[in-house]
Image (cartoon, coloured by chain):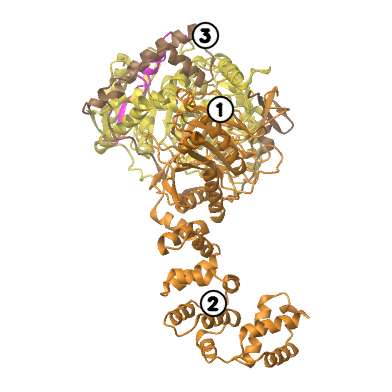
Chain colours: A orange, B yellow, C brown
């Protein structure tokens, strides 16, 4: 057992993720619709994506924008100029027998490089991002090895992909899987890809175990399979450890049905892709103005935001995630902090027992949530002008009544708490006079409105008590 | 020599005024072509129905007094690597037998929008790789001036069609001289425009970064008109540019600076050709131009750089021909994909195409990319700067289009010897410059062409020079 | 003439029969033994000629550039499945029939 652990210590995994930009309306280089799922075979093809001679690629502007969103979210460096390269290899699913892709060697510049993603306590380095086209899809009659021919559907050919390549920074299959889940949340949050769609996110991996060579694993069709495939491969390779030279460098194929990797019998270096600049596409200039526009228009993904809160405000990962989860709550948090509150205090109040109220109030967008008031309240707490209990009452009051701190603070501090029977009287009066009673049963806004009506009759009434009484009454 | 045919403008006037019936003229032409072409073999496909239908429509519109396009009723032959919907496009290769493009090239759309009549598709060296049109899978085209000689290539069919009077105008493509070489050998005008001025959409590529659609004509005004019709920015071609407004013609050629480039008269230049071109250049002096000898640096790299880049791009462009999606497929059994692809490609590509695919693969492969491809690209840079420098002192640079006279059909040469005769035409493609071959007379009864080069977007300078020359020596006749 | 640099003087590699075969494989072309021999000799003299480029040291060409504003908008246009499928040599229903991959 101790030997096994030692071997597992030397595990290095790198990932190569292919993420379709499913939010695009068209393919990467032609105007065919990208909505290819559940379509008749070869319905969404045109001379360009079918590789008919004489056609020319026309780069989709949105694809550039979306790839840059991912680049920015992953903290990548974006070059001033990027270019497309042809990757030459034959395969029946490849309409031109070359793929228009990018290259980061021999003068090529990919659309982004050198990013990173925080994974709990470590940072996973992202080597580069590339924009490229998806090949078509092969099917077989019967089984792949028995079928006398293959059948090709080119609907998928030309779909925009962003290839994300990490450094070999993962030390376990679990880490790799956690990263992929996080990456998926990021691209979904950015509004560029829907990982739910079949085949929208695919992954190749390279795995090495101490003492052995790097082994590529292809054809991992979903993230669910990644952990299984990697664990299998780590186990397989670790059985070589101690033997001469360890595992051999090769490419293997993940067989989902049998849950094993099988050798494709291709030696390293056998492939020679003969990359060279795509002569039909000029070098793309990414001006600072364009990047600024992309940055301004992109939503900040909660995962990325949470990382920022950890770095910028020193929040714990758990708390940062909690605050960042809802964009409006996060905005409120940032406003509170910018007005002078201590970030950890603000985060505690926002994500503590009032989490739901804050979320509801933030979502209502009716100005009930006043950042300045929370800042003041926190100061009152610190200067012992209010007790914790009082502060809580006030905060709750702010959110349920929409009243400001000045008013609520006064009533709270004077300590006037009306007895339940007089509140019941006021509640009944409002229920008699208002026509929003039915609505209040299901609509929290209407409910809060009724609470407000009671408080209008008696400003010193305890809002919490009013709400409780009202709830009891209308449910009857 | 036949009577000199009227200009395109005059032809269009006659059709528009209904002096002649476009349909009759077209039918007559289509009937005459096979008789002439039996000897020459310029056409691979005659678009009889499409041409007649278009002619009829033009007559109908002329009758109604509708405004007709600038090419109304004018016959235009199209090289077989330019896509015209519902017509074959073989590129002179067996591998594209049966292929019918489902779309029109931009140049074809523009010609038809001006009521030009696409007559048919013309013969060419397979995938435009050659300078003789002997490398066509469908047999060679012959030089109308001497049926034992090649017409030049790769657009030999188009040049021969114009030269023999079968077509008024023609389109070719010029990757390393493929319009200018046959223009020179067939005694017609042939223009290779500035890179990016004519859309490549619908042009089946040989080497994308080098090639442009070029035009053939016998009169300078006709050539300029055809260029004007087909050029202009096309959003379907990312390398297409909006050319700056041409400067107003100064009229005449007086005071223009013409440089006779010494490097264009290299050791392979035939004496007769040298003399003929120098004689022709004298005409410019007589017209009041300042003519002098000059040098262009870095020219020694041009041919090697051209072949490295062209072969590299070609090797990749020609990968798509595997028999799966279109064209010929010779594997009828159940061979695996590698064997099936190889069988079709081996049986359907000719020897020159294979040579360039293999060598193109070589210069791109790991370890050799830097040694060949990148060096060729830096040579291209050197050459660009050399021409920029030369055009600071000259409006026009001049030399023989081809260093030799049209070779005999079937003459045995090594591939390298064959490549060497492109030495004067390839620099324009590497640098993207416009260049024009104009007839400069005959040596031993065979045509000699003079190449004029201008700075980027300097087509107007070329037309101006050629027009002055034409005014002085007359319109070259057709060989019929 | 550009200055000769040490790097530029390095000889271009030469070709072998083995590389002709490797290229044929990469290009999916079958060659007979005599074709291999003939091509090797042709390639050798062509590559010998290409050595002139060893002296062409200089900065690589800066190609044309484009800005995102000039790219294609993400707007759906017509596809032409029927049009392109018409020319497919062998098909099975709406699928393109290709050789087997195993």
Where does label 3 land, which residue? C32
Where does label 1 land, which residue? B320
**Local secondary structure at mark 3:** loop
Q: Determine contact: label 1, label 2, CB under 8 Å.
A: no
Task: Name the front one of labels 2 and 3.
Answer: 2
Q: Position of residue A41 (x, y in %)?
A: 70, 37
Q: Nearer the viewer, residue A207 or B278?
A: A207
In the image: residue A400, left or right of residue A289: right
Marks 1/2: CA distance? 62 Å
Magenta stretch encompasses residue B399: yes
Marks 1/3: CA distance? 23 Å
Residue segment shown in magenta: B394-423
Question: In the image, which disc is placed on residue A409?
Answer: none
Q: Nearer the viewer, residue A154 or B115?
A: A154
**Local secondary structure at mark 1:** helix
**Local secondary structure at mark 2:** loop
In the image: residue B387, left or right of residue B26: left
Residue that sits furthest to the right in the current view: A476
Q: Can you see residue B144?
A: no
Where does label 2 land, which residue? A369
Residue C86, above or below B417: below
Task: Name the front one of labels 1 and 2.
Answer: 2
Q: Residue at x 75, y 81 (%)?
A: A474
Marks 2/3: CA distance? 82 Å
Q: Quadrant of residue A203?
A: top right
Label 2: few (<14), some (14–19) or many (≥20) C-alpha neighbours in 10 Å: many
């Amino acid at each position: 057992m101790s030997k096994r652990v030692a071997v597992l210590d030397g595990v290095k995994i790198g990932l190569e993720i292919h993420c379709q930009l499913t939010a695009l309306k068209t393919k990467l280089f032609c105007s065919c619709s990208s909505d290819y799922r559940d379509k008749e075979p070869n319905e969404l093809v045109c001379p360009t994506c079918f590789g008919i001679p004489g056609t020319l690629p026309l780069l989709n502007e949105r694809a550039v924008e979306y790839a840059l969103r991912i680049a920015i979210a992953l903290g990548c460096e974006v070059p001033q100029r990027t270019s497309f390269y042809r990757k030459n290899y034959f395969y029946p699913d490849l309409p031109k027998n070359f793929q228009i892709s990018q290259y980061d060697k021999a003068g090529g510049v990919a659309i982004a490089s050198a990013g990173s993603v925080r994974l709990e306590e470590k940072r996973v380095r992202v080597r580069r991002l590339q924009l490229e086209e998806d090949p078509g899809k092969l099917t077989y009659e019967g089984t792949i090895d028995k079928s006398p021919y293959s059948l090709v559907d080119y609907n998928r050919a030309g779909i925009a992909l962003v290839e994300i390549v990490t450094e070999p920074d993962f030390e376990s299959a679990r880490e790799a899987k956690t990263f992929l889940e996080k990456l998926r949340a990021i691209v979904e949050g950015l509004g560029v890809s829907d990982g739910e769609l079949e085949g929208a996110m695919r992954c190749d991996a390279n795995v090495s175990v101490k003492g052995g060579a790097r082994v590529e694993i292809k054809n991992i069709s979903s993230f669910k399979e990644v952990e299984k495939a990697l664990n299998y491969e780590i186990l397989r390779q670790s059985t070589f450890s101690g033997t001469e030279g360890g595992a051999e460098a090769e490419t293997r194929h993940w067989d989902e049905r049998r849950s094993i990797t099988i050798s494709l019998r291709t030696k390293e270096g056998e492939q020679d892709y003969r990359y060279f600049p795509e002569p039909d596409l000029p070098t793309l200039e990414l001006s600072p103005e364009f990047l600024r526009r992309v940055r301004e228009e992109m939503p900040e993904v909660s995962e990325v935001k949470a990382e920022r809160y950890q770095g910028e405000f020193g929040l714990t990962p758990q708390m940062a995630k909690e605050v960042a989860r809802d964009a409006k709550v996060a905005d409120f948090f940032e406003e509170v902090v910018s007005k002078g509150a201590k970030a950890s205090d603000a985060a505690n109040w926002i994500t503590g027992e009032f989490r739901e109220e804050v979320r509801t109030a933030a979502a209502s967008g009716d100005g009930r949530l006043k950042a300045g008031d929370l800042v003041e309240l926190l100061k009152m707490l610190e200067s012992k002008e209010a007790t914790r209990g009082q502060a809580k009452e006030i905060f709750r009051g702010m959110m349920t009544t929409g009243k400001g701190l000045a008013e609520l603070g006064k009533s709270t501090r004077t300590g006037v708490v009306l007895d339940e029977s007089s509140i019941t009287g006021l509640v009944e009066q409002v229920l008699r006079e208002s026509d929003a009673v039915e609505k209040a049963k299901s609509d929290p806004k209407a409910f809060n409105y009724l609470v407000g009506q009671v408080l209008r009759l008696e400003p010193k009434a305890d809002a919490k008590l009013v709400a409780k009484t009202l709830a009891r009454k209308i449910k009857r | 020599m036949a009577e000199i045919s009227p200009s395109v403008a005059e032809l269009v006037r006659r059709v528009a005024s209904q002096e002649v019936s476009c349909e009759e003229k077209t039918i007559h032409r289509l009937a005459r072509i096979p008789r002439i072409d039996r000897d020459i073999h310029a056409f691979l496909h005659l678009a009889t129905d499409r041409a007649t239908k278009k002619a009829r429509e033009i007559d109908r519109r002329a009758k109604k007094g509708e405004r007709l396009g600038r090419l109304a009723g004018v016959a235009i032959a199209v090289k077989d690597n330019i896509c015209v919907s519902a017509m074959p496009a073989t590129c002179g290769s067996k591998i594209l037998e049966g292929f019918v493009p489902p779309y029109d090239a931009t140049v074809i759309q523009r010609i038809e929008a001006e009521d030009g009549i696409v007559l048919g598709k013309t013969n060419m060296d397979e995938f435009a790789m050659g300078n003789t049109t002997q490398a066509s899978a469908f047999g060679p085209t012959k030089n109308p001036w001497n049926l034992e000689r090649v017409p030049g290539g790769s657009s030999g069919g188009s040049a021969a069609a114009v030269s023999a009077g079968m077509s008024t105008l023609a389109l070719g493509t010029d990757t390393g001289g493929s319009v200018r070489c046959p223009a020179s050998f067939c005694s017609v005008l042939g223009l290779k425009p500035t890179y990016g001025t004519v859309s490549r959409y619908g042009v089946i590529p040989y080497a994308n970064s080098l090639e442009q659609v070029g035009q053939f004509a016998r009169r300078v005004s006709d050539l300029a008109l055809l260029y004007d019709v087909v050029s202009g920015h096309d959003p379907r071609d990312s390398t297409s540019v909006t050319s700056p407004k041409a400067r107003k013609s100064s009229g005449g050629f007086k005071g223009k600076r013409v440089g006779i480039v010494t490097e264009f008269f290299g050791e392979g230049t035939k004496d007769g050709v040298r003399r003929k071109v120098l004689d022709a250049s004298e005409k410019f002096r007589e017209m009041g131009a300042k003519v002098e000898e000059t040098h262009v640096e870095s020219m020694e790299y041009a041919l090697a750089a051209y072949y490295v880049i062209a072969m590299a791009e070609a090797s990749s462009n020609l990968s798509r021909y595997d028999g799966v999606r279109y064209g010929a497929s010779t594997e009828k059994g159940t061979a695996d994909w590698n064997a099936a692809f190889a069988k079709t490609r081996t049986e359907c590509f000719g020897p020159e195409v294979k040579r360039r695919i293999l060598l193109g693969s070589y210069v791109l492969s790991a370890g050799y990319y830097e040694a060949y491809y990148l060096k060729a690209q830096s040579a291209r840079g050197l050459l660009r700067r050399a021409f920029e420098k030369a055009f600071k002192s000259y409006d026009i640079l001049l030399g023989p289009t081809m260093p030799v006279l049209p070779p005999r059909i079937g003459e045995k040469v090594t591939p390298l010897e064959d490549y060497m005769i492109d030495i004067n035409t390839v620099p324009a493609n590497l640098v993207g410059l416009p260049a024009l071959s104009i007839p400069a007379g005959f040596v031993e009864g065979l045509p000699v062409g003079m190449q004029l080069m201008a700075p980027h977007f300097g087509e107007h300078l070329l037309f101006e020079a050629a027009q002055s020359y034409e005014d002085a020596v007359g319109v070259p006749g057709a060989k019929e | 003439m550009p200055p000769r640099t040490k790097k530029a003087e390095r000889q271009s590699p030469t070709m072998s029969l083995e590389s002709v075969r490797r290229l044929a494989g990469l290009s999916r072309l079958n060659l007979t033994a005599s074709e291999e021999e003939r091509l090797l000799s042709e390639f050798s003299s062509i590559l010998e000629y290409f050595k002139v480029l060893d002296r062409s040291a200089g900065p690589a060409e800066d190609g044309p550039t484009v800005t995102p504003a000039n790219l294609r908008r993400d707007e759906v246009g017509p596809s032409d499945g029927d049009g392109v499928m018409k020319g497919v040599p062998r098909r099975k229903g709406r699928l393109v029939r290709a050789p087997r991959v195993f």
